[in-house]
Image (tube, rainbow, N blue to C red):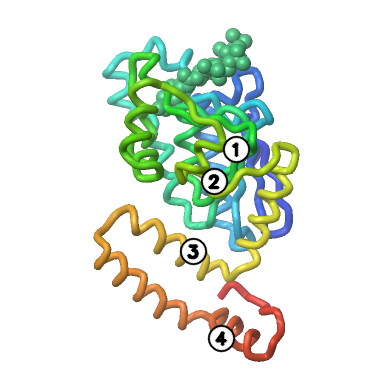
Amino acid sequence: MTYETVLLERKGRVALLTLHRPEALNALDLRVMTEVVAAAEELDRDPEVGCIVLTGSAKAFAAGADIKEMRPRSYMDMYLSDWFTTWDRLGQVRTPTLAAVSGYALGGGCELAMMCDILLAADTARFGQPEIKLGVIPGIGGSQRLTRAVGKAKAMELCLTGRTMDAVEAERAGLVSRIVPADELLSEALAVAETVAGMSKPVAMMAKEAVNRAFETTLAEGVRFERRLFHAAFATADQEEGMSAFVDKRPPRFTHR
Ligand code: CAA
């Protein structure tokens, strides 16, 4: 499919999705939401895609949900259309995802980045949930995912004051895995994605599922879930290949089966 507000490029087993609504700093309106989710689901169905990178522009990953689109809406509009619920489908994508964030990642932009599995930040990145300044609260999971990522103290301060964090603070708080110089962000993101995409896809999917389970369940249940998936990895051809390659002192040739 072709999309207007998101550019889709394929680089081997890596797919790159670039938010492209420059006139509004990639503000997330209905069309962006529909297209990003459709593109991610299209890529998720493709067995040749091993990792999906989501990025924005140098100035803005995304400056939030589209305020102008939301402004005239009533409670009934929001409730009956179940506004933003479509975004949840991005979190259900099974292929590993990586957000490469440069510039503003505010409100829905921060929430979108947090829905991805790996979060790399340029040194120019700024994160925050400033919805309170607009008379609303986060609506795409920010109050939940930010709290799980950085803890109550910082999440509460950011959600109650609307203060934004720079990349250094975000890394220290555990929101991002690494900071990269802005001009190297994309190449580094693609390199990380290529590494992930070079692993066995079904096993990478299991690893993602296991880590995500930590957010949903008790430690005992999570460990049990992990153990069962670990056992399941032994049903893959890639387990045999990976372990044989180690013993034979050669790189593995995964077939993603
Ligand atoms: N929605 C709609 N349009 C937006 C937007 C948004 N979230 N963010 C920026 N824009 C538009 C601006 O209106 C402006 O358009 P015009 O030229 O037509 O006026 C254009 O993008 C450029 O923006 P600025 O001129 O404001 O650029 P700046 O460099 O001066 O400031 C900024 C950048 C600090 C990010 C500022 O644009 C800003 O504060 N944006 C809003 C951030 C925000 O509040 N985000 C949360 C939105 S609510 C939400 O996300 C709810 C949720 O939980 C999902």
* Residue at numbered disc 4: 240
Q: Nearer the viewer, mark 3 or mark 2?
A: 2
Image side of residue 33 versus residue 8, left or right: left
Cβ atoms at labels 1 and 2 below 8 Å apart: yes
* Chain-order first, disc 1 or disc 2: 1
- Quadrant (top left/top right/bottom left/bottom right) for the C terminus: bottom right
Disc 4 marks which amino acid?
A: Glu
Name the disc covering residue 119, or none: 2
Which element carries disc 4, helix, strand or loop? helix
Residue neighbourhood size for the residue with mark 2, other residues' Cα within 10 Å, grouped as few (<14), some (14–19), many (≥20): many
* Chain-order first, disc 2 or disc 4: 2
* Chain-order first, disc 1 or disc 3: 1
Residue neighbourhood size for the residue with mark 1, other residues' Cα within 10 Å, grouped as few (<14), some (14–19), many (≥20): many
* Chain-order first, disc 3 or disc 2: 2
Residue neighbourhood size for the residue with mark 4, other residues' Cα within 10 Å, grouped as few (<14), some (14–19), many (≥20): some
Cβ atoms at labels 1 and 4 below 8 Å apart: no
Q: Residue 17 or 3: which is nearer the viewer?
A: 17
Q: Residue 198 or 89: which is nearer the viewer?
A: 198
Cβ atoms at labels 4 and 3 below 8 Å apart: no
Residue 202, position as x, y percentages in the image: 51, 69
Disc 3 marks which amino acid?
A: Met
Image side of residue 177 versus residue 102, left or right: left
Which element carries disc 1, helix, strand or loop? strand
Q: Residue 156 or 23: which is nearer the viewer?
A: 156
Image side of residue 117 versus residue 148, left or right: right
Disc 2 marks which amino acid?
A: Leu
Q: Nearer the viewer, mark 1 or mark 3?
A: 1
Which residue is depicted at the point 53% across and 56% down? Answer: 96
